[in-house]
């Protein structure tokens, strides 16, 4: 419960700091943000059909900092998300853990077309574990900055608006970091055993699309593709996120999202015949909750 209180306190503090902030329409900077605190709870008492008491809390901070002057533009997105869930007798476990920084510097080459230089960084805050059937921890499978991905490079972009754009970089270095020595010794996330980083060089494609499909309901699509020229370029890494935002009123919303990742260099926990093992596979994460959202 202390962790939920901490998340709540952080959310309230952010609301107080941002309450009076407004974007100047004449400014070369356009700053938008969403602070969302989601809560889910299920409680059962003498319930004939059965059920497990559970509580979850998620904090999502999603900010855009966009610059435009003459032929120059600079679009930046910062996303941080962390969530915890608790079920009876199982203790607290995280159900969301993301850090995302996207930056795209552009110079107009033609209407809606830009010469660009991009930077993308994504990682996580805390440890992640694989669990046994009895709920006990079996093994550490991830940690803060383990993994972390940094990619950058020149390219060309199409930008119709802040809500629809894509960028292609045919020459993009990418670094994979595994800062946790235990995971590095296992060769996790494609690094050589004992090494804490891996270098790749390939092509990167990023796309973003957001649209209101009806009143008070919007969808957001984020797609990232990467092909490593140095090793199996046909095995394209895929990271796709779909978010759905449903506004109830100014401060209350219902949010749902799914993220799907496939990375040929990442082994994921699997189970066969009661035995746990690791292998290649599609990673899928789903989030759904109702809560409080403050936009500016």
Image (tube, helix red, strand yellow):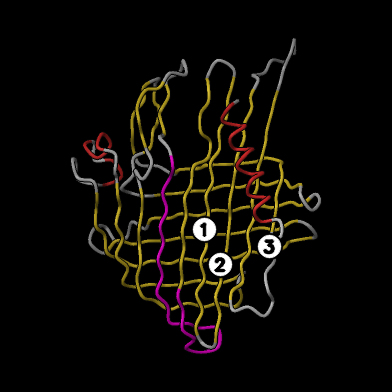
Residue 174 position in % (x across, y down): 31, 60
C-alpha separation, residue under disc 3 versus residue under disc 1: 18 Å
At a point 55% along the width and 65% down the height, the residue shown is 208
Quick one: 281 or 113, which is closer to the camera? Answer: 113
Q: Earlier in the sequence, mark 3 or mark 2?
A: 3
Query: Do the residues bearing badges 3 and 2 touch, measured as CB atoms within 8 Å?
Result: no
Mark 2 neighbour density, 10 Å: few (under 14) some (14–19) many (20 or more) = some
| Residue denoted by label 2 | 65
The dot on residue 21 is 3
Residue 176 position in % (x across, y down): 30, 52
Q: Is mark 1 on a helix, strand or loop?
A: strand
Mark 1 neighbour density, 10 Å: few (under 14) some (14–19) many (20 or more) = some
The dot on residue 42 is none
At a point 29% along the width and 65% down the height, the residue shown is 173
- Is residue 166 depicted above or below 81 in this figure? below
Q: Which of marks 3 and 1 is nearer the N terminus?
A: 3
Q: Which quadrant of the structure image shows residue 42?
A: top right
Quick one: 167 or 82, which is closer to the camera? Answer: 82
Residue 185 lies left or right of residue 107; in this view the side is left
Q: Does the magenta stretch include residue 119?
A: yes
Give the magenta part as a residue range.
105-125
- Location of the N terminus (image quadrant): top right
Q: Magenta residues: mostly which secondary structure?
A: strand
- Is residue 131 depicted above or below 174 in this figure? above
At a point 56% along the width and 71% down the height, the residue shown is 66
> Which is more foreground, mark 3 or mark 1?
3
Q: Which of marks 2 and 1 is nearer the N terminus?
A: 2
At a point 69% along the width and 57% down the height, the residue shown is 295
Query: Do the residues bearing badges 2 and 1 touch, measured as CB atoms within 8 Å?
Result: yes
| Residue denoted by label 1 | 78
């Amino acid at each position: 419960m202390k962790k939920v209180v901490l998340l709540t306190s952080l959310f309230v503090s952010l609301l107080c700091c941002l309450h009076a902030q407004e974007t100047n329409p004449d400014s070369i900077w356009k700053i938008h943000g969403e602070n969302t605190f989601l809560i889910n709870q299920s409680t059962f008492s003498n319930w004939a059909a059965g059920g497990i008491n559970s509580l979850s809390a998620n904090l999502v901070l999603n900010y855009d900092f966009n610059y435009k002057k003459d032929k120059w533009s600079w679009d930046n997105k910062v996303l941080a998300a962390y969530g915890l869930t608790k079920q009876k007798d199982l203790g607290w476990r995280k159900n969301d853990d993301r850090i995302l920084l996207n930056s795209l510097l552009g110079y107009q080459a033609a209407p809606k077309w830009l010469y660009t230089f991009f930077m993308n960084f994504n990682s996580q805050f805390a440890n992640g574990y694989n669990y046994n059937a009895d709920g006990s921890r079996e093994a550490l499978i991830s940690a803060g900055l383990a993994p972390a991905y940094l990619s950058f490079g020149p390219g060309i972009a199409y930008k119709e608006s802040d809500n629809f754009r894509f960028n292609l970089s045919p020459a993009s270095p990418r670094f994979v970091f595994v800062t946790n020595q235990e995971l590095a010794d296992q060769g996790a996330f494609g690094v050589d055993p004992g090494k804490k980083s891996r270098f790749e060089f390939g092509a990167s494609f990023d796309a973003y699309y957001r649209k209101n499909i009806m009143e008070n309901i919007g969808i957001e699509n984020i797609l990232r593709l990467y092909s490593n020229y140095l090793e199996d370029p046909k095995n394209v890494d895929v990271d796709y996120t779909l978010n759905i935002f449903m506004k109830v009123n100014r401060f209350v919303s219902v949010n749902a999202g799914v993220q799907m990742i496939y990375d040929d260099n990442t082994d994921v926990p699997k189970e066969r015949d009661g035995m746990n093992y690791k292998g290649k596979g599609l990673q899928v994460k789903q989030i759904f909750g109702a809560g409080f959202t403050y936009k500016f």
